[in-house]
Each structure stands twice: as C-alpha cells, then as structure tokens.
Amino acid sequence: MKISVLNSSPKNNLSLTLQTVLFLKKWFQDILKEDVFEIVPAFSGKVTEEIEKSIKESDLIIMTGAIFHFDIHSNMGELLDELSDKYYDSIKDKAVSFISTSGLIGDTLAHNRFEIWARRNKLKYINSLSLESAEVLSPAGREELFCWFKFARTLTDYYTNRTMPHTASHGKVVLFDTCSKENAEVSNAVESAKRRFENSGFETDIITLREKNIRHCTGCQCCFSNRNCIFKDDWEKTFEQLYLNTDMIVYFGELHYGSLGNCYKTFIERHASLGRSGIEDEVIKSYFFVMDDKSDREDINEFKVNCETFDGLNCSFLSDVCPLGNENDMTELYDKMTIAFNSDIMPQNGFLKNSLRYGFASVAARVRNRCPGDFTYFKNIGCYDIPEPHPFVQWIDNAKEAQKDSESRIMHYKMLLEHLDELPVVTPRRKNKGVSVIERQKALARGSSASEDDTKPRFNGRPNHIPAGAMPPFPPGFPNGQPFRPAVPVTGK
C-alpha cells in the first residue's frame, strides 16, 4: 500500500506529529516491509507538483498537523480549500485521515472540520487520531497508534475491494432500539443490522428500551456513596444486558434537537449510580438515527459532538453516526465496526474523555465526603497530582533559542526510534468484559475490587498508564496529601 503523508505542521521536520508517522513507517516499512510512506512537506498551503503527484499515486492520504486555537492551522485550511477547488478529481474516492498530537478537548473542533471537508468532497474519511504528545512515547500510546493505523490500512483495502469482513474472533453485538414509540424504519434497520453482523460471524442481541420499566432519576444522590439506586426497576438489568460480554453496541433512535430522544436520555440519567468514574469499558459504538422535518445539518453536527460526549465518560471507540435511509451507507458502517473489532482498536473515541474526566475529578474532590469511591478512583489515577515541570520547557526570547527548544523536544522521539526494532505488544480489548460493570462500581465504592485488574491504577482504560504532565493540579481548597475529613453535620443547640 502506498501512503501519502502531507505534513502541514509549521515545525516541519521538528514536528512532534511527524514523529508518530516515523513510528508507523518504521513498523510497517522497515519491519513488516509492507507499505511505502511518502512524506511530503505541505506547510506552504499550496498544492505543489510533488503533492499532486503523491496524492494521485497513493492509496491512503494522511494529513498531519498541529491544532491552533482549537482548529486546524490556517495553512492547512488553505491547502484543503485548494485541493477541493482545483484538484477535486484527484482526491475524490481516496481514503483519507488526519493525525494530531495535542489530545485535548479543543481537538474536537479541528477533527470535525477535517471530517466535514472530507465528506463534502467525496473522500473516504477514516476516523482520525489525536494523541497527547507524551503518550506517543509510552508503550500504551504506541500500541494505540499501531492499532489505529492497522484499522486505517484495513479500511482502505475494504474501500478498494468491498468484500464483507468477517470477525477474526468470537464477538457479541447488541442492537439497541431507543425509540420512545415503535418506528417501522428503525425496526427494519435493526433486523437488517442483525443479518449483516450474523453473516460476519457475530452473536447478536436486540434490546428494545421502550419495553423496559425505567423510572426517571430524581437526583436524590443516595447512590453517590454506595452505588445503589433507590429504584428497583429494569434499569440495572437492562444495563447489564447492554454491556456484559458485549464488544460492540449499535444505537438506533430519533434525532431530537441534536441529541437522542427522551427515552434514551432517561436511561442515560440513571447512569449517575455508576459514579463519576464512568464505565471504563472498551466498547465499539455507532449511532443510527431517524431524521424528521425539523432536523437540519446543524442538528447532525451537534449530534456527533453529543455522542462523543456520552462516550467520553466510558472510554468507548465511537465508530460513527449515520442517518437511516441509505442502505449502502449503513452496511458500510456495520463493516467498519467489524474492521475496528478485528483491528483491536483502542478506546480513542472522540477527543473529550480526558477533559471530561478531569472535570468530574474536580467535582469528586469537592464532594468527596459523599462519594469517597469517586474520590479514591480519581486519586489512584493521579488526577490530583501536581505534575513535575518538563525539563525542556523554558522561556525563550529569540528564534535561535526557539529552534533549540524544538530540537530538544524531539530528542526523546529520535532516541526511541533508533531502538524501535519490534512491533508493539497489543493488549487484548475488554479483558474484563465478563465482569459486571455495576458490581465493579459497587466494589469501588466499598474500597474493594470486583476483579484483580481493577485494583491497578488506570488511565484511558488501560492499567498503569499515566502520561507525564497530563494531570491537572489538585482542585483549590484540597491540598495534595491532606487527609480528608468527613463533613460534620450542623446541629442545633
């Protein structure tokens, strides 16, 4: 496979994002001897003859670049505009993706813009990747990069050959009908999805949410300390059916003002009993929705962000969202989920999970006397640690010092690249999928564990992976290391 890498970083060869591509090139070209990487400088914002030639001859186009003010760099925007205006025939139907290395909440806007550009210009968009730069140096970060690229390569082959992928190992898919009322279009889509996944080798299960007796959350907060909800209805049973031993979930529902309908929202609200630590399961998800006369493109874009937010709390890989209606698009997404399952794709969903987690960690610190399980969880993964200053971060006041600073930042990457002589060891996805999520959370609230692996500190859903410098400072009013004192009830004389 020939891969064209258009490096749009202003730092060019000193770009940290470019180092991720060099890892990929080392693995797949030098070790596996499978792919040809052509890395082309593209910071000028213009389509040069070299860029045009590289694109025409490539099977997969990867754009690399930095995130500036929550968006792609302006020069990359100019390059995309020129490609769509003058070179549309050269890029259409090409597989394309985007890599950045900041891994922050602002990346969402940049990657969404790139996705919209790709889809409007008839390119075959592949879920792009955003890693925190320090993560790339860690074994887990390189593993995630490797699995993502394995997924991108396989999907590129799929777009060329259009053969139905088959599951490489036993897997289970749950089809989740979240409509408040029966909808014939949704029911037909669920049956169609069932046939496709079963033909690919998956076990399938169907859950119809409206048939369940699930009461509205009253916000009583009784579950904060012990994870036990006051209501004894179908919520816990439905949740277990949805997640226990499940590898992939496909949601079907109505588009309701940029989000899923009220029936599903009621179900989501009851997740409060799981605490602020989230679900911590690496489940692949996709959302299919019915549009009504009031829905427009703005609702669809907002819906994508909302889905990323939902999944940002439970470390799931969001494959895509898709309106019901076009059978070819729906089948393509089913196959895309199968390829993600086969590729051991890691839970690099959206780009919101870390910032959401830090926000919830701050809340847990303020009310830790009421939810000690949440506080203990976030403390164990380091959310209240004050990060050590990076040894190469310094104030600079001229271009020469800035150049030296950039060179020092990539020193670690170059040293690692020189000694990278084998492929990453891929961690099995969902190794705890047979353990009840609810029981795990209840055990966490008790200060014990429902499984041996759950006693280990976790970050991004994987054990013992806390990137250097990735944690926020301890919330105000709770100095690091101070023992906490339960709130003393106020009583009258």
Image (cartoon, rainbow, N blue to C red):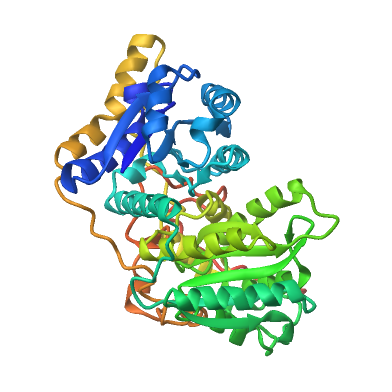
Displayed quadrant of residue 13: top left
Q: Is residue 390 above or below residue 408?
A: below
Residue 289 visible somewhere in the drawing: yes
In the image, taking residue 383 as reference, residue 183 lies left or right, namely right
Displayed quadrant of residue 25: top left
Q: Nearer the viewer, residue 451 or 491?
A: 451
Q: Which quadrant does the N terminus fall into?
A: top left
At 16% from the left edge and 50% from the top edge, which residue is drawn? Answer: 422
In the image, taking residue 11 as reference, residue 267 lies left or right, namely right
At 56% from the left edge and 30% from the top edge, which residue is drawn? Answer: 88
Residue 315 visible somewhere in the drawing: no
At 66% from the left edge and 70% from the top edge, which residue is drawn? Answer: 252
Q: Is residue 237 above or below residue 381?
A: below
Residue 406 location in percent, x, y? 33, 23
Residue 185 location in percent, x, y? 73, 72
Residue 355 location in percent, x, y? 54, 49
Residue 267 location in percent, x, y? 68, 75
Q: Nearer the viewer, residue 108 or 460?
A: 108
Displayed quadrant of residue 116: top right
Q: Nearer the viewer, residue 455 or 171?
A: 171
Name, please, the residue furthest toward the bottom: 232
